[in-house]
Amino acid sequence: MQESFSTALQRTGEDPDGVRSRFARYKLGEIMVMMGMITREKRDIVVGRQHRIKLQFGACCLRMKLITEEELTRALGLQFGFLHPVVGRFTFSKDLVVAHQPFGKYAEVVREVCSRLLFSWASNGRNALAVTSTQRKEGRSHVAANLAVAFAQMGCKTLLLDADLRNPRQHTIFDLPLHPGLSRLLCGYAPDEVAYSVDSLKNLTLITAGPEPPNPLELIGRSQLPSVMQYLRDHYDLVIVDTPCGSQYMDSELIASATGSALMVALENHSRVGKVRTFSQRLIGNGVCLAGTLMNTR
């Protein structure tokens, strides 16, 4: 007797990679049967009908009203190798491409970047990553948000931290309140008091920037930041940190030093090579591990 999806996920000590490999080799109809969405009899009926009307299996199930769009997303997510797709209704910004178009080419590229980071950067025991760039409007917040969602989809318990206290964007992207956020956390709030669980995506937690302080550099430079970062690293598999641009503010360097690692984002036909190189060298000189440079084309 074949093991059900829910049994595989609930088994003690089950490796998510093992679940992926077990279910990803099945056809979509078989996965739906194993998840209890449809019976084998209905699956066979759908197979016969889809060949006659030349429609994909999932679309045919929707037309026959056998499943919901949320169920189709779950089944496709498992077939394509990530356990926790974004499901249900959500009000995320269109900037969050991996949520709105989880099976598109862009989402596939983001997941490839995540896999490369896990293989090369996180394999050395690192789990906190500052997403940086030299100038404004190069896509730091966009990249940080999409990476965080993709990591969560892959089964990693992920925290997205908006550490841009000057021009925060993550609360807008995820349609969440700005308060209380990181600025309050650095002033004495407990982590549980400022963290938002993203209801439509298991494994993702967000800490927004919070109200803008009159002294962001001083607040970031306080001794609390390293201890806060250590606490977050101990409680999450991965911590992705959005930062201000490096050419205008020193905040980004302080944040990267606290995380220990940074991913440099550059915008195609916009970023200046010299500035990217200079900023990268400053980070490395401060003992920061440079995980790589990502060319953003959006």
Image (cartoon, helix red, strand yellow):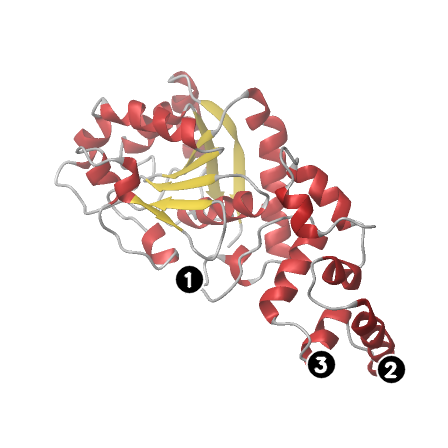
Question: Residue 132, can we see it?
Answer: no
Residue at 80% across, 75% down: 46
Looking at numbered disc 3 in the image, what kind of residue is underneath it?
A: Met
Looking at numbered disc 1 in the image, what kind of residue is underneath it?
A: Ser
Whole-angstrom CA distance, mark 1 to mark 2, is 38 Å
Mark 3 sits on what residue? Answer: 64
Whole-angstrom CA distance, mark 3 to mark 1, is 31 Å
Marking on residue 25: none
Residue 265 sits above or below residue 99 on the image: above
Q: Where residue 4 appears, x then y in whole percent?
A: 72, 52
Q: Secondary structure at mark 3?
A: loop
Q: Where residue 144 appears, x then y in whole percent?
A: 45, 44
Position of 93 with respect to 154 (left or right) is left
Residue situated in front as seen by the camera: 22 or 90: 22
**Mark 1 Cα within 10 Å, few/some/many (few <14, many 20+)?**
some
Looking at numbered disc 2 in the image, what kind of residue is underneath it?
A: Arg
**Mark 3 Cα within 10 Å, few/some/many (few <14, many 20+)?**
few
Residue at 47% across, 42% down: 266
| Closer to the eye: label 2 or 3 | 3
Decide which of tag 1 and tag 2 comes sooner along the chain: 2
Residue situated in front as seen by the camera: 68 or 298: 68
